[in-house]
Image (spheres, rainbow, N blue to C red):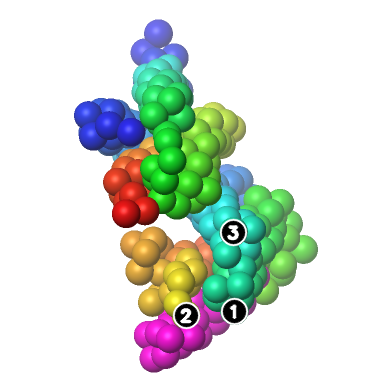
Amino acid sequence: MRDRGLGRPAEAAAPGSAGPARVLVLLYGIFALAAGARAGVQLATRFDEAPLAYLLSAFAAAVYVVATVALAHGGSGGRRTALAAILVELAGVLVVGTLSLADPAAFPDETVWSAYGRGYGYVPLVLPVLGLLLLSRRRGD
Amino acid sequence: MSLVLVVAITAVAALVVLAGLASTVARRRTGLVHLAGAGLLEALLVLQAVLALARMGDGTPADTPTFLGYLFGVLLIPVAGVLWAQAERTRWAGTVLAVAAAAVGVMVWRLLQLWEATGA
């Protein structure tokens, strides 16, 4: 009864098991949803106001979707794709974050990457770092 | 949208976060306690969605598409969290659920913000 209520004892994290990676996949999934929904709304309702920012939103969403799927899929192919997506994501959050602070006029509306992801508690800045750490740790498996 | 409901949802989400982290610390998978907490959270979110839809009117909230995106998007999070946590056999299952519940806790406050921003 205790096991059913509180959960059975955990298995040790075996090589190749999801473990912490599953936490990261969920985070990426949430950001894929958040960025995708935001881009969808922006593109559908007010594309003319800030086409660059909104296309960037859509691009960010696509990167999150690719990273989510690649991380969830795993394997060497998945890891390679995830690495590429995460590097693009890291470059995106750094470049867009810097530009949005240096030239706010060019970014009249927020994207997930504006001001290094300030609107999302800076999680967009931390996420690629965690992703890279995880990928580098698993390379030894 | 009501502040009372948002506070209640935040409280339940916080309990689910704690339960999830506790099972990770205790090296356990998720169990019925976690399922019940996430179920209650989802029920409150559905209630919130129904109430908000009933009270929506002209110009309230100003950014209706974004509001609806959050209102329905947030319904997916506990379900995804539970499914993703149940499939995890290591102690990280609880952390998965905790992350999902924390995201819900943040999203409902953003929802309230969107609701209170009227076009006027």
Tell me the element at label 2. loop
Residue position marked by numbered label 1 in the rendering: A52
Residue A52 position, x and y percent, is 59, 79
Residue A49 position, x and y percent, is 55, 73
Task: Check residue A43 for magenta coloring.
Answer: no
| Sequence-earlier tag: 3 or 1 | 3
Residue A82 position, x and y percent, is 66, 65
Viewer-nearest of discs 2 and 3: 3
Residue position marked by numbered label 2 in the rendering: A107
Mark 1 vs 2: CB contact within 8 A: yes
| Kind of residue sitting beneath label 2 | Phe
Tell me the element at label 3. helix
Mark 3–mark 1 Cα distance, whole angstroms, equals: 15 Å
Residue B27 visible (yes or no): no
Q: Nearer the viewer, residue B75 or B50?
A: B50
Against A45, residue B90 (above or below) is above
Viewer-nearest of discs 3 and 1: 3
Task: Check residue A89 for magenta coloring.
Answer: yes
| Sequence-earlier tag: 2 or 3 | 3
- The quadrant of the rendering that contains the N terminus of chain B is top left
Residue position marked by numbered label 3 in the rendering: A45
Residue A136 position, x and y percent, is 56, 70
Mark 2–mark 3 Cα distance, whole angstroms, equals: 17 Å
Q: Which mark is residue A140?
A: none
Q: Which residues are magenta?
A: A85-106
Against B102, residue B48 (above or below) is above
Mark 3 vs 1: CB contact within 8 A: no
- How many other residues sit within 10 Å of disc 2, few (<14), some (14-19) or many (≥20)? some
Residue A134 visible (yes or no): yes
Against A41, residue A9 (above or below) is above
